[in-house]
Amino acid sequence: MNKNKASKMREPLNIENSIAGVIDEIIEIRRYFHQNPELGQNEFNTMNTICSFLDKYGIEYEKNVADTGVVALIIGNTTDKVIGVRADIDALPIKEESNVDFKSHNENVMHACGHDIHTAILLGLGKLLKLMEKDLKGSVKLFFQPAEETTGGAERMIKEGCLKNPDVDAVLGLHVSSDIEAGKIGIKYGKMYAASDMITINVSGVQTHGAYPHDGIDPIVISSNIVMALQTLVSRNMSPWNSAVFTIGSMHAGTSGNIIPEAAKMTGISRTLDVKTRKLFQRRLVEICESIARAYGGKAEVNIVESYAPLINDDSMVDLVREAAVDSIGENNIIVMKEPYLGTEDFSYFAAAKKSCFFSLGIRNEEKGYIHPIHSNKFAADEDSISIGMKIFLNSILKFFG
Ligand SMILES: [Zn+2]
Ligand SMILES: [Zn+2]
């Protein structure tokens, strides 16, 4: 933390002191969530706990949004500008093997993606904002979002109207990162996370004896050709300055070496970073599979299930968060990330609906042994990151209100 920078801040309230006054409680809350993790769509205790703290802080809210989500509202002095901040609240089906002394009490469920930290930061932010509501030149909505790891809660919350009444102008969010040291953050302009599609390809041929292939149509040969041709999605259909991944991860056919089977089945994924490339892949995938199968006398059926949308940050919002982060932690602690993640994140639906910035909050600390990546059963985070997350959100909101 850069104390020199912090002392130069011009906000009417002393943010540093305000955070210091609440941080112990927020860390307690984080540990409670860590000990009581719940899977996506089952976050009932989590939702009720969030509501009990909102009650305590005197913040109005609506619960059961997208079943187990909460939308809270802090109305400022003027309501000209409204900004939303989102935290995901669900955990993962993992048996915890970390060394923390507040391990999960729910067997085989663990906050291994840091959503307990996201939730605590948002509650801490809410508490601070409520204390300064009379000075706020705008209103703030807090989105406690369920099911990020499963079916996705963001899109459902938006469909249920969380961005309306009052209408939200912009949205902020963060995710912990074990690649980044505690005390630092990562920001990314433009494309940040990928869109994900799940693909199934069913190839049908004609079954026959392995010694008489001319009497049948071989779905294994057809599938092999399809797999090779699909490599050209990346190498020949998209710009070399863009990036994407296409993987066939399973391929099943046949029962015996001397029988040509009737059918083959493949499954795979594609990860693309914008909607245009995603649509291009979907179209070419069908064309390639169907045409190759037809050329060999067989048939291919392609089934594409769209998962999350690509997360694309708004550059002006990234600039705003960057300035707020310079005030909060100093320029040297901000990493401008060059490459996007090919993982997914359903904050993307907020980012598609409103100008948004999602950033990475460093939680790595080698000395304390916090080195394990998210989704690891040994995942643990440096809790010093919690006050940094609160501070950057708060400074960003104040900057947004001007
Ligand atoms: Zn995760
Ligand atoms: Zn996560």
Image (cartoon, rainbow, N blue to C red):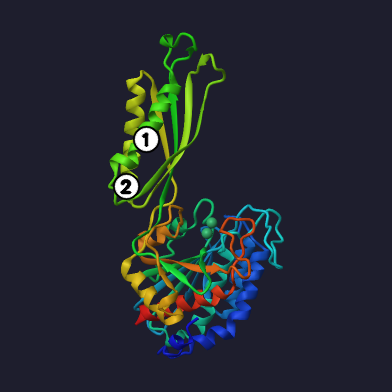
Q: Is residue 222 above or below residue 213?
A: below
Q: Nearer the viewer, residue 1 or 141?
A: 1
Q: Quadrant of the C terminus?
A: bottom left
Query: Dot 2, crowdedness within 10 Å: few (<14), some or many (≥20)?
Result: many
- At x 56% / y 20%, what residue is drawn? 255
User: Seen in the image, is 312 located left or right of residue 307?
Assistant: left
Note whether 13 is above or below 292 in the view shown: below
Please tell me which of labels 1 and 2 falls first in the chain: 1
Tell me residue 50's x, y (percent): 59, 70
User: Is disc 1 surrounded by few (<14), some (14 to 19) or many (20+) residues within 10 Å?
Assistant: some
User: Which residue occupies 64% across, 63% down?
Assistant: 45
Residue 369 appears anywhere in the view: yes
Q: Position of residue 203 (x, y in %)?
A: 43, 25
Q: Nearer the viewer, residue 10 or 377?
A: 377
Quarter of the image where one finds residue 380: bottom right
Residue 374 picture location, percent across and down: 56, 58
In the displayed structure, 53 sits above or below 291; it is below
Mark 2 residue element? helix
Residue that carries the numbered disc 2 in the rendered image: 277
Residue at x-position 41% and y-position 90%: 8
Badge number at residue 328: none
Q: Amino acid at mark 1?
A: Leu
Q: Residue furthest front?
A: 367
Does the rendering let one see residue 397? no
In the image shown, does 235 or 101 lie closer to the viewer? Answer: 235
In the figure, 266 relative to 172: above or below?
A: above
Which residue is identified by label 1? 230
In the rendering, at what x and y percent does residue 398 appear?
40, 81
Spatial distance from mark 1 to mark 2, Cα to Cα?
A: 15 Å
